[in-house]
Amino acid sequence: MLSAQSLLQQLEQNIAQAVVGKEEAVELLFNALLCGGHVLIEDVPGVGKTTLASAFARSLALSFKRIQFTPDVTPSDVTGYSVMDFKTGDMHFKQGAVFCNLLLADEINRTSPKTQSSLLEVMQEGQVTADGVTRQLRQPFMVLATQNPVDFVGTYPLPEAQLDRFFMRIEIGYPSREEEIKVLEIYRGAKSHVEEIEPICGETDILELQQQVTQVRVSREMRMYITNIAQASRSAKLFGRGISTRGAIALMRAAQAGALTRGRDYVIPEDVRDLASPVLAHRLSLSPEARISQKNASEEKALTRLIASIPVPVRSK
């Protein structure tokens, strides 16, 4: 059984065969997987969102499916539907795309709100209810969704209830000059380097590490620290919508996974601060006053200011 640290290092090396310079994004994806969470990868077209998600999936010996969201995709394509066997008269359930370990929901905000909503139960409960029958999904289960910024043509903004079900939102960003040169070197041939990636761990390894995450100690001081962040977001004039209780739980769990991948069995303030933005920013909305009064205002910047104003616990073990 590999340690979380060793497995993360191998994942980064494995994915680097197809994706250059995205170690931080890989670390966040791995963190979310260890927490049983789902990830929304948001950025402009062409920076490697789908490539990163595909390379991550191929590095794990887990069942994987991809669904390309377009306006004509229906909820039954996602969750499944029943069909009649005309020979016997029996109804048979045809599984949708979600019946796998890893689901790549590509360009999720290009499909209708109705189809987007078909993932609500799946992401929260890990199950599908169709025709009055509830079917459990195989564990571990993770949704990797990509989307373009909401101001792009042909996009449908995700509702708050669905955003809150994403454990993290991460951005890829443009590569540096050196990284882009290396990307061109890798892809100068015709072959796809993603298809060459071999899995390095499987279902049993992930389930064992997920159990280890829950055993990482979170002191009362650290629980109070996370609570203070959530409470402050709800009363701050910067935000029109604060952090939900689900968000506070997610931050605690992410901090536990962060500690585990850094070789500790207890959470410290740095674990919380380092993961606060990807875990919490998409759950917040700036108030109209903040958007007007602050130049280049964003939820990430406002959250950073808020956390900086909250006292850090002295004792965290």
Image (spheres, helix red, strand yellow):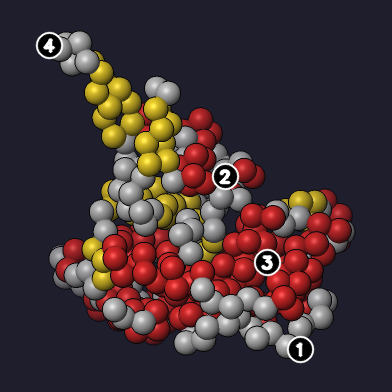
Structural crowding at the residue carrying mark 4, measured as other residues with C-alpha within 10 Å and reported as few (<14), some (14–19) or many (≥20): few
How many angstroms separate mark 4 from mark 3 (CA)?
Answer: 58 Å
Q: Which residue is mark 3?
A: 300
Residue occupying image coordinates x 39% and y 22%: 131
Comparing marks 2 and 1, which lies closer to the viewer?
1
Would you identify the image quadrant in which residue 70 lies? top left
Would you identify the image quadrant in which residue 48 lies? bottom left
Given the image, on which type of amino acid does mark 2 rest? Gln
How many angstroms separate mark 4 from mark 1 (CA)?
Answer: 71 Å
Q: Which residue is mark 1?
A: 314
Quadrant showing the N terminus:
bottom left
In the figure, 62 relative to 21: above or below? above
Q: For mark 3, give the secondary structure.
A: helix
Q: Which residue is mark 4?
A: 87
How many angstroms separate mark 3 from mark 2 (CA)?
Answer: 19 Å
- Mark with earlier residue (3, 2): 2
Q: Which mark is residue 224?
A: none
Given the image, on which type of amino acid does mark 3 rest? Glu
Give the percent coordinates (x, y) of residue 313.
76, 83
Comparing marks 2 and 4, which lies closer to the viewer?
4
- Mark with earlier residue (4, 3): 4
Instruction: Please name whichever residue, 26 or 101, is drawn nearer the observer in this view of the structure.
Output: 101
- Mark with earlier residue (4, 1): 4
Q: Are marks 2 and 4 in contact (CB under 8 Å)?
A: no
In-image side of 176 versus 277 (left or right)? left
Quadrant showing the C terminus:
bottom right
Q: Are marks 4 and 1 in contact (CB under 8 Å)?
A: no
- Mark with earlier residue (2, 1): 2
Q: For mark 2, give the secondary structure.
A: helix
Give the percent coordinates (x, y) of residue 37.
48, 58
Give the percent coordinates (x, y) of residue 169.
54, 60
Instruction: Please name whichever residue, 309 or 316, is drawn nearer the observer in this view of the structure.
Output: 316
